[in-house]
Image (tube, grey):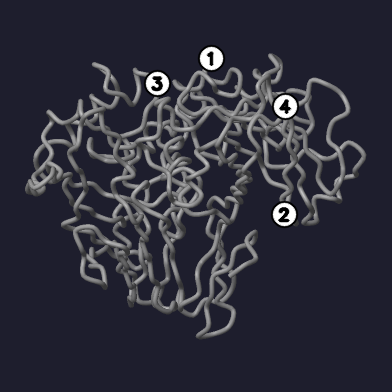
């Protein structure tokens, strides 16, 4: 029996106790025990010539070294915003010149503008695409806007250390105070860093693209990123696919006929390679088994709900039960790559969703027979739960900026923010165990079943001309390297079955 009378409970050391304990001294002079002897840096250029406005940029990676996927491995990009006067009648277009700060009250660049220049980013191993998420083209820049805005400041400083970084180009305020031409708006405060009449330089780590980006928050707390064992892998190929029409990221003030573009002058991969002790290097390349990489898996479905609908049912087939759902609306034209930022009239990143309630079943099993329940996102009791979930079980497992999590921002599906959304946490408090259907013993969670989601809308119905984006997510292991067969390593996802 413990001294305090409680069986099996061990009293924690206090600061009072600690002052009497001897400090541990690490013998750093014993170099025979070193695993890492140092690191070297390599610059990898794209395998195809870099064009000013590229269709694709590819990086082929082969190496005899283990790569540290730490803060030293990232892309380095240099480019310039340029403009010219358009052709009028017999007058030809003017020459392209760097955009000065004085243009900022005539044209706005879309939030998170670099991601919006991309269709998608692909990574291949031995010509096989590595799939850790099921996500359509063109949608991820919208989600990344939300993530850049709400991520913890320490994470953002690591990902976006330069003032001109596109991740710093995201609104946090609604309406004219955010991304608008209005004096003192967030756009006009950011614009001098990119409209500076010279080239801009920023580093870039693609969010949630493993193995370059691991875990759910970038180097937050005690999270670290696992090495990439290049000596036992075949070639890796990373491909950036760009949109066809750059003008889609610009919104011009009425009467402005100038033309704008962003031109690339450098796009390189900076890699940190580890110098390992010979015994440790040999032990690693001969090690066989399954190596897990922690990270985010996203399963996305887009629904074009008929305008002004009062209710709608969406079914996601044969899926593991997720940790949560995150739902928002964006212009329907996004799905075909035809969306233009010039069409944005609200200054918001997400469109209004007008959702009043969400109910769902898994394998036809219901979760609630009483109200209120967690799908009633506008209920006062549930809003308080959502507030707690943002703090302790946030969307996508991302550590949040606590200053931006307020009851006012949560209220009515985040309608008071540039990011109206519905967030439903499907885990119990304290860990990743899932809530279970009311008549189930829990065995249902061991199966992949249909998740049916029913939307009910407030007065006026569903928003016109938008696509409702449904994200399911998993935040444990999203990539496994299988080295059990000598000479034939391969990557597999525990959740995404199409490869």
Read off the residue under disc 1. Answer: 408
Residue 314 is drawn in which quadrant?
top right
| SS at circle 4 | strand
Instruction: Tell me what residue is drawn at x 40 percent, y 19 percent.
Output: 175
Coordinates of residue 122 in the picture (x, y in percent): 43, 63
317 w.r.t. 199: above or below: below
Choose mark 1 or mark 3, whichever is in front. 3
Q: Is residue 54 above or below residue 147?
A: below
Q: Is residue 350 left or right of residue 319?
A: left
User: Is tag 4's residue or tag 1's residue first in the polypeptide sequence?
Assistant: 4
- Residue 211 got which mark? none
Q: Which mark is residue 319?
A: 2
* Comes first in the chain, label 1 or label 3: 3
Q: Residue furthest right?
A: 439
Q: Quadrant of residue 65?
A: bottom left
Callout 1 crowding tier (Cα within 10 Å): few <14, some 14–19, many ≥20: some
Question: Which residue position holds label 4?
Answer: 357
Of the image marks 4 and 2, the number of the one nearer the N terminus: 2
Mark 1 lies on a secondary structure that is: helix
Answer whether labels 2 and 3 touch (C-beta < 8 Å): no
Q: CA distance from mark 4 to mark 1?
A: 19 Å
| Nearest to N terminus: mark 2 or mark 3 | 3
Mark pair 4, 2: CA separation: 22 Å
């Amino acid at each position: 029996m413990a001294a305090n009378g409680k069986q099996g409970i061990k009293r924690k050391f206090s600061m009072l106790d600690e002052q009497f304990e001897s400090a541990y001294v690490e013998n750093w002079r014993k170099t025979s025990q070193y695993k890492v002897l140092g690191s070297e840096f390599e610059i990898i250029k794209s395998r195809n010539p870099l064009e000013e406005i590229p269709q694709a940029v590819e990086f082929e990676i082969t190496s005899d070294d283990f790569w540290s996927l730490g803060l030293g491995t990232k892309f380095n990009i240099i480019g310039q915003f340029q403009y010219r006067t358009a052709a009028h009648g017999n007058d030809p277009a003017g020459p392209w010149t760097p955009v000065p700060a004085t243009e900022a009250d005539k044209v706005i660049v879309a939030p998170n503008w670099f991601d919006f220049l991309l269709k998608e980013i692909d990574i291949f191993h031995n010509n096989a695409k590595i799939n850790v998420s099921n996500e359509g083209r063109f949608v991820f820049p919208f989600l990344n806007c939300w993530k850049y805005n709400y991520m913890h400041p320490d994470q953002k400083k690591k990902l976006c250390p330069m003032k001109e970084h596109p991740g710093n180009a995201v609104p946090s305020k609604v309406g004219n105070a955010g991304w608008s031409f209005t004096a003192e708006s967030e756009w006009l405060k950011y614009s001098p860093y990119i409209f500076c009449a010279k080239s801009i330089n920023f580093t870039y780590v693609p969010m949630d693209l493993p193995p370059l980006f691991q875990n759910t928050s970038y180097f937050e707390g005690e999270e670290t990123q696992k090495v990439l064992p290049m000596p036992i892998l075949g070639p890796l190929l990373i491909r950036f696919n760009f949109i066809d029409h750059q003008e889609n990221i610009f919104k011009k003030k009425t009467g402005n006929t100038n033309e704008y573009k962003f031109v690339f002058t450098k796009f390189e991969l900076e890699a940190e390679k580890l110098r390992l002790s010979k015994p440790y290097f040999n032990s690693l390349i001969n090690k066989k088994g399954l190596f897990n990489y922690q990270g985010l898996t996203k399963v996305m479905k887009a629904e074009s709900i008929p305008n002004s609908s009062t209710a709608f049912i969406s079914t996601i087939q044969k899926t593991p039960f997720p940790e949560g759902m995150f739902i928002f609306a964006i212009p329907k034209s996004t799905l075909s790559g035809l969306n233009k930022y010039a069409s944005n009239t609200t200054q918001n990143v997400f469109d209004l969703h007008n959702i009043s309630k969400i109910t769902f079943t898994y394998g036809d099993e219901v979760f609630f027979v009483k109200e209120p329940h967690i799908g009633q996102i506008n209920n006062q009791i549930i809003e308080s739960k959502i507030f707690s979930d943002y703090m302790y079980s946030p969307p996508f497992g991302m550590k949040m900026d606590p200053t931006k999590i307020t009851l006012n921002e949560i209220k009515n599906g985040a309608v008071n923010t540039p990011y109206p959304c519905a967030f439903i946490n499907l885990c119990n408090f304290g860990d990743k165990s899932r809530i279970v259907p009311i008549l189930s013993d829990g065995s249902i969670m061991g199966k992949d079943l249909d998740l049916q989601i029913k939307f009910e809308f407030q007065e006026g119905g569903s928003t016109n001309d938008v696509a409702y984006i449904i994200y399911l997510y998993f935040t444990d292991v999203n990539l496994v390297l299988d080295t059990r067969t000598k000479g034939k390593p391969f990557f597999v996802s525990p959740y995404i079955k199409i490869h």
